[in-house]
Image (spheres, grey):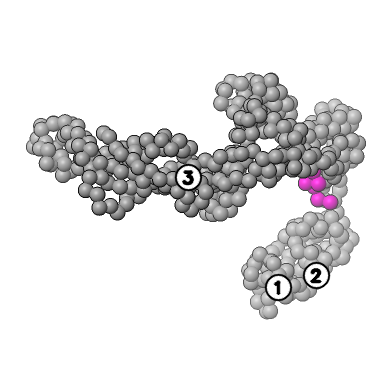
């Protein structure tokens, strides 16, 4: 069926939105509907009639709307496709097609509104400064890591002295606003470690200095930005009763400690070597991640582009789905936690923007992943497993499993290219900052 599609290219709501006017000949549409009804009539079944012998007017009465809808949908698809090919548009998402008011007796007229991909013109990265974090792993970093591992294996022993910072306490407490207890202000046998921030600072300060068996009443004012609006900036009274005070006891760095870290013979030298090897691998990974973030920020700065709302919306839905899956894996009830699209909008826009910029950058500078790169990344990621050769075989067993690794290789190529072309400033980063440890 022939369709006529007249088009105009105009900016509507943003720089990437386009509008096409589509015209569908009524005579051709009617002819297509008639042919569809004939095909339907050959197979339609109805009581009192042999198959294929149902009168045409009855077939039209029952199936005419469906046939017309399908015929019009196909006609609009063809008209839109022809117009897009003529204009050489790169469509992002799906068009919104709406009927137009028309006085024509020969054509049905429609307006198709849609978005196109932006033309990415790569900017000059030499004007962008990229900060490259630097950290060398030495004896101090290994010692710090051992200290963290000791704290992760801390045990607590009861003491008769007054509670101090870093002690674990067990208390009963009752909070009252005026003379009435308030919701969430009461607990029995409640354990927490002083100084870890589990309770508000004023509450912890009231506990410090008390021994097991002692009680105390004190006033406390909640912060103005406290999450409970009923308590924010309010002064309340707490009655507390100390049930127990326990001091932290860290394990000695000896053979037994080494065995808990997987060193079978308890050799402390082997333990330090393994910790250093694993630490260097982890530091390298975190430094690369920070450098990559710096590069991506630089690329966004050097290449400001408009992004299609349709692609951003699709990315938002993808991020929501990923968040739901993550929550389900953690055992959370997803249905009880409705997610708002606006929570993900900034992240989605950033990801879409970077995807378009990286796509052009890779194409222009031939930064595609190479097989030896992919192999090296797979082997490096497999090193931390007990049987690395099995992990490597798993990746190569199915080609689609390598897609994520190929993406990593491409990003590595982009980072290397950017560092070679931008202004790079090395800056030392503290171990605790890189590892996300509290000071």
**Is residue 295 toward the left or the right of residue 134 in the image?**
left
Looking at the rendering, the stretch of residues picked out in magenta corresponds to: 433-439
> Mark 1 and 2 residues: CB-CB less than 8 Å, in contact?
no
Element carrying mark 2 = strand
Q: Quadrant of the N terminus?
A: top left
Looking at marks 1 and 3 on the same chain, the residue that comes earlier in the sequence is marked by 3
Q: Are marks 2 and 3 in contact (CB under 8 Å)?
A: no
Res 282 label: none
CA distance separating discs 1 and 3: 49 Å
Q: Dividing the picture into quarters, in which one does residue 71 lie?
A: top left
Mark 3: few/some/many CA within 10 Å (<14, 14-19, 20+): many
| 292 and 204: which is toward the camera | 292
Q: CA distance from mark 2 to mark 3?
A: 68 Å
Disc number for residue 215: 2
Hey, which quadrant is residue 410 in on the image?
top right
Q: Earlier in the sequence, mark 2 or mark 3?
A: 3
Observer-nearest of 278 and 173: 278
Looking at the rendered structure, the secondary structure element under dot 1 is: loop
Left or right of 130 on screen, residue 39: left
- Identify the disc placed on residue 233: 1
Image location of residue 112, percent across then percent down: 39, 46
Image coordinates of residue 150 in percent, x first then y, are 84, 43
Q: Which residue is the site of mark 3?
A: 115
Q: Residue at x 47, y 45 (%)?
A: 115
């Amino acid at each position: 069926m022939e369709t006529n599609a007249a088009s105009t290219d105009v900016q509507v709501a943003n720089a990437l939105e386009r509008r096409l006017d589509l015209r569908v000949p009524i005579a051709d549409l009617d002819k297509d509907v008639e042919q569809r009804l004939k095909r339907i009539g050959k197979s339609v079944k109805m009581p009192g009639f042999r198959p294929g012998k149902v009168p045409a007017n009855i077939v039209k009465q029952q199936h005419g709307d469906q046939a017309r809808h399908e015929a019009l949908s196909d006609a609009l698809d063809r008209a839109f496709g022809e117009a897009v090919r003529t204009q050489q548009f790169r469509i992002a998402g799906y068009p919104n097609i709406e009927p137009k008011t028309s006085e024509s007796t020969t054509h049905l007229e429609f307006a198709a509104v849609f978005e196109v991909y932006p033309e990415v013109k790569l900017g000059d990265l030499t004007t962008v400064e990229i900060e490259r974090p630097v950290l060398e792993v030495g004896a101090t970093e290994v010692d710090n890591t051992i200290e963290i591992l000791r704290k992760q294996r801390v045990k607590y022993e009861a003491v008769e002295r007054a509670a101090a910072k870093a002690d674990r306490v067990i208390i009963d407490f009752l909070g009252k606003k005026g003379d009435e207890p308030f919701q969430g202000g009461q607990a029995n046998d409640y354990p927490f470690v002083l100084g870890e921030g589990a309770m508000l600072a004023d509450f912890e300060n009231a506990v410090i200095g008390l021994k097991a068996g002692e009680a105390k009443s004190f006033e406390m004012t909640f912060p103005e930005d406290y999450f409970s609006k009923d308590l924010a900036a309010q002064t309340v009274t707490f009655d507390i009763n100390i049930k127990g005070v326990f001091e932290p006891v860290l394990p000695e760095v000896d053979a037994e400690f080494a065995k808990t870290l997987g060193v079978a013979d308890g050799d402390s030298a082997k333990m330090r070597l393994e910790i250093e090897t694993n630490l260097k691998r982890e530091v390298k990974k975190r430094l690369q991640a920070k450098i990559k973030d710096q590069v991506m920020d630089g690329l966004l700065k050097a290449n400001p582009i408009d992004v299609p709302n349709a692609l951003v919306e699709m990315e938002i839905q993808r991020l929501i789905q990923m968040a739901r899956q993550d929550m389900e894996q953690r055992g959370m009830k997803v249905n009880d936690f409705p997610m708002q699209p606006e929570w993900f909008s900034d992240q989605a826009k950033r990801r879409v923007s970077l995807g378009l910029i990286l796509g052009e950058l890779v194409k222009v500078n031939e930064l595609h992943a190479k097989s030896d790169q992919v192999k090296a990344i797979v082997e490096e990621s497999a090193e931390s497993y007990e049987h690395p050769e099995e992990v490597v075989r798993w990746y190569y067993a199915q080609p689609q499993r390598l897609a994520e690794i190929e993406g990593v290789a491409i990003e590595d190529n982009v980072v290397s290219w950017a560092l070679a072309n931008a202004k790079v400033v090395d800056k030392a980063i503290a171990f605790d900052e890189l590892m996300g440890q509290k000071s």
